[in-house]
Image: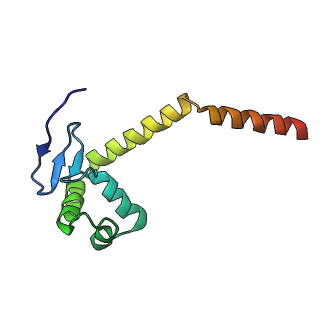
Amino acid sequence: MLNYPMQATRYEHIVLSEQGVPEIQGSTMKVLERVLSQKAYGWSPEELHFQYPHLSLGQIHSALAYYWDHKDELEAAMLESVRFADEMRSRYESPFQVDLRERVKQNRDVYL
């Protein structure tokens, strides 16, 4: 993996992580995480500030501005992350999943 130093952006409170992921400066929060909170719950910037009081309203507004200016790129990255997680989930099963599937199969056979 390549290591890049944090990079400033033209958004006052937004930096790019070593992996090129936009984060809120002074935190480990990704811009997309806060946007997803807003979308999932319909939260205003003020409500986001209430829920995450360690973030200033300036940081929150910068994150939202960054998202809207880079919406297609960020949503494509999010969809790729979901696709990758789904692929890994379908490729690998936990011992719990295997055990549960076997138990369901055994109980189904008993009742059929």
Nearest to the observer: residue 112 or residue 27: 27
Name the residue located 32 percent from the left edge and 42 percent from the top edge: 77
Q: Is residue 110 left or right of residue 64?
A: right
Q: Is residue 109 left or right of residue 30?
A: right
* Quarter of the rendering containing residue 43: bottom left
* Quarter of the rendering containing residue 44: bottom left
Name the residue located 14 percent from the left edge and 41 percent from the top edge: 6
Which image quadrant: the N terminus?
A: top left
Which image quadrant: the C terminus?
A: top right
Residue 81 placement (x, y as % from top left): 39, 40
Name the residue located 43 percent from the left edge and 35 percent from the top edge: 84
| Colouring scheme, one of rainbow, by chain, secondary structure, one colour | rainbow
Q: How many marks?
A: 0
* Quarter of the rendering containing residue 82: top left
Nearest to the observer: residue 67 or residue 20: 20
Answer above or below: position of 64 versus 93.
below
Residue 96 placement (x, y as % from top left): 64, 36
Answer above or below: position of 45 versus 19.
below
Residue 30 placement (x, y as % from top left): 28, 50
Extreme residue toward the top, this view: 1
Name the residue located 49 percent from the left edge and 37 percent from the top edge: 86
Q: Is residue 23 visible?
A: yes
Q: Is residue 112 visible?
A: no
